[in-house]
Image (tube, helix red, strand yellow):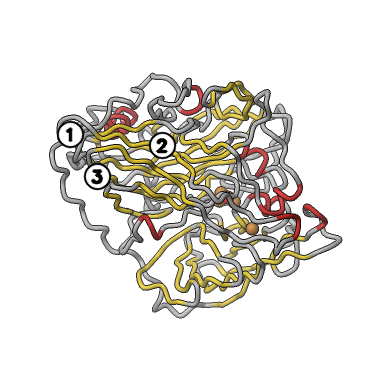
């Protein structure tokens, strides 16, 4: 039934061995015979991925170690500690999960239970968040209110419902006030909830700024106000790695935007790229790559059909607003950033199989919402606790873990208007319950579009519908520019039966 472990299958799936059979539970599934890919993924037992690879320019892309569930359970230890990590041609001191940047990829299926023994060997308090998973926020689940002190450890148990959406998710620390600094320093990893297609590979994009001696640079107060953008952009902890492919070959790339504030508008010129989905599942009418803006926290599930030649995967500049001249600042890099190169050469691959249709995507546009509420991003001057004395918050209030801002009746479909009268874009993120975007930039969204992070551009609003189903508990929503979240742009939602 399972001739290969799923760990092998993932690696081979990336390496495209046509005849890999991924065993389903009780029923074998035959993945599409997507074709041969580069032998550049490290096999099982190979080197840990990401930052440990000596990264002179020209190194091939490596992938984080994959830890896959067996018989419905994945039990892992994640040790958080500062380590020396090779980044490009420097040795950096970063914060790591199990010694690597990114941390290991967790490979799960709907219905699985994830047990994480989190060990905090940092100098600061931390915790664990499984971004995008539709799982309980209570107790030792995906609980953002927990505080794991230095030297302590904690056992998380995270149960995915049987009908959990497939897709690319990720994990990172979430202790309020520490999130941006800890993530910026290297603490992130991917989570894949498998579907029936070959799992493909993850490309975790992050950014960091280093001091001359390889420490993570402390960021300035204006950088915190704008949301820091790191000077070095990494893919799986590497600097501009090479990806290779045969002409005609199809590769699935799961891109995670693990940057603290940087938005990614991806470009891969001369190559055929299909967007399968964003954040969770397949999308009925996905945007083209050129129309896709990945806010911090978003993920893109891409299918690349390689065409002969060399292409550059770039992040194009994106203006996310500024502080109207105050504190000197525009937010954004004005130059495109090269993330990786794709080199397509050699004998042509077999033509790839046709892609199975996305299937039905749930649509809440005809549902009468049980409640409507408006949440407004606010940035106020003076007397605040945030950088520069500013108050970052919602509805004029900064985050207070003791206060409940939104009480929701379990089971309700609610409509939330996310209003952004500020001069900067803010990516809105809600834990646990995915959101269907129904209106953006004043325009109704045509196809059912599910996200767990949705950017609300400066001076505009986005309307989402949220089915607060299956689960109850208290959790958070926030700006995923994590400097803003740490400064208070976060609120508490309590979903109660
Ligand atoms: Cu990825 Cu509450 O965040
Ligand atoms: Cu999250
Ligand atoms: Cu923000």
* Viewer-nearest of discs 1 and 3: 3
List the residue tagged with mark 1: 18
The answer to which of 39 and 368 lies nearer the viewer is: 39
The answer to which of 449 and 247 lies nearer the viewer is: 247
Q: Measure the alpha-carbon separation of dots 1 and 3.
A: 16 Å
Say what secondary structure mark 2 lies in.
strand
User: In x, y percent, where is residue 111?
Assistant: 39, 46
Say what secondary structure mark 3 lies in.
strand
Say what secondary structure mark 1 lies in.
loop
The numbered mark, 1 or 3, whose residue comes first in the sequence reads 1
Seen in the image, is 394 located left or right of residue 285?
right
The numbered mark, 2 or 3, whose residue comes first in the sequence reads 3
User: In x, y percent, where is residue 148?
Assistant: 69, 36
Seen in the image, is 37 located left or right of residue 340?
left
The answer to which of 271 and 470 lies nearer the viewer is: 271
Q: Contact, CB < 8 Å: mark 1 with mark 3?
A: no
Quarter holding the N terminus?
A: top left
List the residue tagged with mark 3: 305
User: In x, y percent, where is residue 71?
Assistant: 35, 34
Q: Measure the alpha-carbon separation of dots 2 and 1.
A: 26 Å
Image quadrant of residue 87? top right
Residue 474 visible to an observer of this rendering: no
- Residue at image x 16%, y 36%? 349
List the residue tagged with mark 2: 340
The answer to which of 199 and 383 lies nearer the viewer is: 383
- Residue at image x 26%, y 46%? 196
């Amino acid at each position: 039934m399972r001739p290969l472990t799923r760990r092998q299958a993932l690696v081979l799936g990336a390496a495209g061995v046509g005849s890999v059979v991924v065993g389903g539970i009780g029923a074998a599934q035959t993945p599409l015979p997507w074709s041969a890919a580069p032998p550049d993924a490290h096999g099982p037992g190979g080197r840990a991925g990401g930052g440990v690879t000596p990264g002179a320019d020209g190194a091939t892309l490596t992938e984080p170690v994959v830890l896959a569930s067996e018989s419905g359970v994945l039990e892992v230890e994640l040790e958080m500690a500062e380590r020396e990590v090779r980044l490009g041609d420097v040795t950096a001191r970063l914060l790591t999960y199990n010694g690597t940047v990114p941390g290991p990829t967790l490979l799960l299926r709907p219905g699985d239970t994830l047990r994480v023994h989190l060990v905090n060997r940092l100098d600061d308090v931390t915790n664990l968040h499984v971004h995008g998973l539709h799982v309980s926020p209570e107790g030792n689940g995906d609980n953002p209110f927990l505080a794991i002190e230095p030297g302590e450890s904690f056992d998380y148990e995270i149960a995915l419902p049987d009908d959990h959406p497939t897709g690319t998710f990720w994990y990172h620390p979430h202790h309020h006030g520490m999130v941006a600094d800890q993530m910026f320093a290297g603490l992130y990893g991917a989570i894949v909830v498998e579907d029936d297609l070959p799992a493909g590979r993850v490309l975790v994009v992050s950014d960091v700024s280093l001091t001359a001696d390889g420490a993570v640079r402390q960021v300035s107060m204006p950088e915190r106000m704008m949301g820091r953008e790191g000077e070095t952009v990494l893919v799986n902890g590497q600097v501009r790695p090479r990806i290779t492919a045969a002409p005609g070959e199809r590769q699935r790339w799961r891109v995670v935007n693990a940057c603290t504030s940087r938005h990614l508008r991806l470009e891969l010129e001369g190559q055929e790229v299909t967007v399968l989905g964003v954040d969770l599942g397949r999308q009925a009418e996905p945007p083209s790559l050129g129309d896709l803006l990945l806010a911090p926290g978003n993920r893109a599930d891409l299918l690349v059909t390689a065409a002969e030649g060399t292409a550059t995967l770039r992040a194009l500049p994106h203006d996310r607003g500024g502080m109207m001249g105050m504190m000197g600042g525009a937010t954004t890099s004005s130059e495109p950033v090269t993330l990786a190169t794709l080199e397509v050469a050699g004998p042509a691959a077999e033509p790839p199989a046709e892609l199975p249709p996305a299937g039905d995507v749930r649509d809440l546009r005809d549902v009468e919402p049980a409640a409507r509420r408006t949440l407004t991003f606010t940035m106020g001057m003076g007397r605040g606790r945030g950088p520069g004395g500013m108050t970052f918050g919602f509805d004029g209030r900064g985050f207070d873990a003791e206060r409940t801002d939104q009480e929701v009746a379990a089971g309700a479909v609610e409509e939330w208007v996310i209003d952004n009268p500020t001069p900067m874009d803010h990516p809105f993120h809600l834990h646990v319950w995915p959101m269907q975007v129904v209106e953006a930039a004043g325009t109704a969204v045509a196809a059912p579009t599910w996200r767990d992070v949705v950017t609300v551009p400066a001076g505009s609003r986005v309307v989402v519908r949220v089915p607060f189903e299956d689960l109850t508990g208290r959790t958070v929503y926030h700006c995923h520019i994590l400097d803003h979240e740490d400064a208070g742009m976060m609120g508490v939602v309590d979903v109660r039966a």
